[in-house]
Image (cartoon, rainbow, N blue to C red):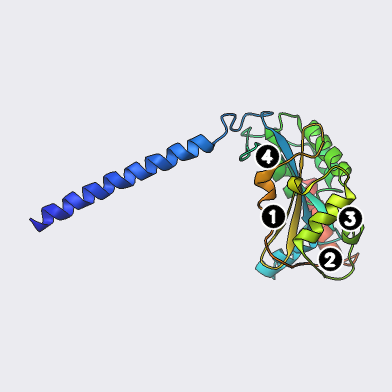
Amino acid sequence: MWGHRVRQAARVAAVAASFILILAVVAFAQQTDPRQNAPGKFDFYVLALSWSPSYCDSVKQRAPGRQPGPECSGRPFAFVVHGLWPQYEQGYPSYCQVPAERLTRSIVSGMLDLMPSPQLIFHEWQRHGTCSGLTPPAYFETLRKARALVKIPPDYLDPPAPVTVSPEAVADAFVKANPGLTRSQIAVTCDKTRLTEVRLCLAKDFAFHDCGEVAQRSCKREQVIMPAVRAAGTDKRAALDSAIALSVH
């Protein structure tokens, strides 16, 4: 009798769990954009600018013995382009063409002034660029135009020493430096201690674009650190190794 009740309770629990799973799948499907992963079918871009010193500090913290990549050696970098990401008003597409069209060496080498890691360039094209509906040359030209549109506030161009900032103040400084930009069109992100990125929303015609879903993900910490830009000439051997790695692609 007891065993029968246990089996009956287990069946009821299994049915309830299945029902909950179905509801979750339906809810997810309702939130998924019907254009999911169709190249060129999106609403706006996010231009993500990464504070390179924060990235380099985090990599060194996670793997102290690892040789630094090109973005953390050789030429010092401040804000670099993480990517230009096609977005829906809710959510975003990714990996819209598998396999992705291969990037030529000239495209990769031509982007290293803005995106200092070949690995990053390949990754961003595969995950985000393929969703733009553009060819590789057109996508990276669009990325370059988007970056040229945005002015970095003077205080954050090249700080020689670590700076403690509030994410709100950084966002306000970008708004002040870029006419037409509002706080509903920008997000400043962070990890536990460091400012990591500034993300700006742009329409396809490069006008600043409201993006509530992106803006609400801004860092909620009162203060974070912006590590200083490295001194020039650091770890030249790592830079040489990175150049050799690029030549094999």
Disc 2 to disc 3: CB gap under 8 Å = no
Q: Secondary structure at mark 4?
A: helix
Residue position marked by numbered label 4 in the rendering: 126
151, above or below 78, in the image: above
How far apart marks 4 and 2 lie (CA) works out to 29 Å
Q: Which mark is residue 153?
A: 3
The residue drawn where x is 26% and y is 50% is 13
- Residue 99 spot, x, y in % from top left: 63, 34
Q: Which mark is residue 138?
A: none
Q: Say which of marks 4 and 2 sits in front.
A: 4
Residue position marked by numbered label 2 in the rendering: 235
How far apart marks 2 and 3 lie (CA) works out to 28 Å
Callout 2, which amino acid? Asp
Quarter of image, res 73? bottom right
Residue position marked by numbered label 1 in the rendering: 218
Label 1: how many Cα within 10 Å (few below 14, some 14–19, many 20+): some
Label 2: how many Cα within 10 Å (few below 14, some 14–19, many 20+): some
Question: Quick check: 82 left or right of 175?
Answer: left
Q: Say which of marks 4 and 3 sits in front.
A: 3
Sequence-first tag of 4 and 2: 4
Sequence-first tag of 3 and 1: 3
Callout 4, which amino acid? Gln
Of 177 and 7, nearer the camera is: 177
- Residue 184 spot, x, y in % from top left: 74, 46
Q: Say which of marks 1 and 2 sits in front.
A: 1
